[in-house]
Amino acid sequence: LLFRGPTLRPFGFTFRLSPRDREESGTVLKIIRMFKQSMAPQTTPSSLFLKASNTYRLEFLTSGGGKHRYLPKVKECALSDFSVNFTPDGSYMTYENNSMVSYEISFSFQEIEPVYNSDYDNDGDTSIGY
């Protein structure tokens, strides 16, 4: 009665990017373009068929580079939405190269495989799990 089947978990993240110079402005542009492009479906060389967009493996890491025990593990995800707020401070401001002073990027990821009870058995560690 209570069980309606496994579900695919969504994850949302928001980051603010504020480039400090021309080089960082170029890096922000590349980051935004890369995520927009990677979530778009791909075509085969003949353009007759579509292939799936890229998927992501998300991990929460500690400052030492190890896996964070107190944050959830995430299975492989698809980027379902990516948005950019070009005026996160409420006003239009640019540098001399026309780059925005600040950007706010938001990600919506969705796992492509449900979490099962047996995933905790295969965990092999003492983390919080999935």
Image: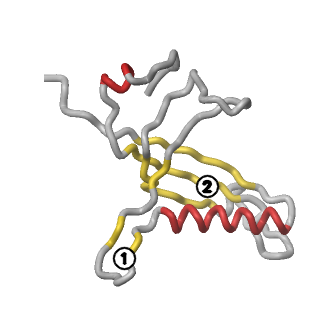
Tell me the residue at 86%/63% (across/down).
21
Q: Are marks 1 and 2 in contact (CB under 8 Å)?
A: no
Which tag, 1 or 2, sits closer to the chain's start? 1
Outermost residue on the left side: it is 1
Residue drawn at 53 percent across, 65 percent down: 36
Q: Which residue is mark 1?
A: 44
- Residue 23 location (% of width, % of height): 83, 66
Q: Quadrant of residue 105?
A: bottom right
Say which element carries label 1.
Answer: loop
62 and 94: which is toward the camera: 62
Looking at the image, residue 80 lies above or below residue 23: above
Q: Callout 1, which amino acid?
A: Thr
Label 2: which residue?
105
**Callout 2 secondary element:** strand
**Residue 21: assigned label:** none
Looking at the image, which is closer to me, 96 or 47? Answer: 47
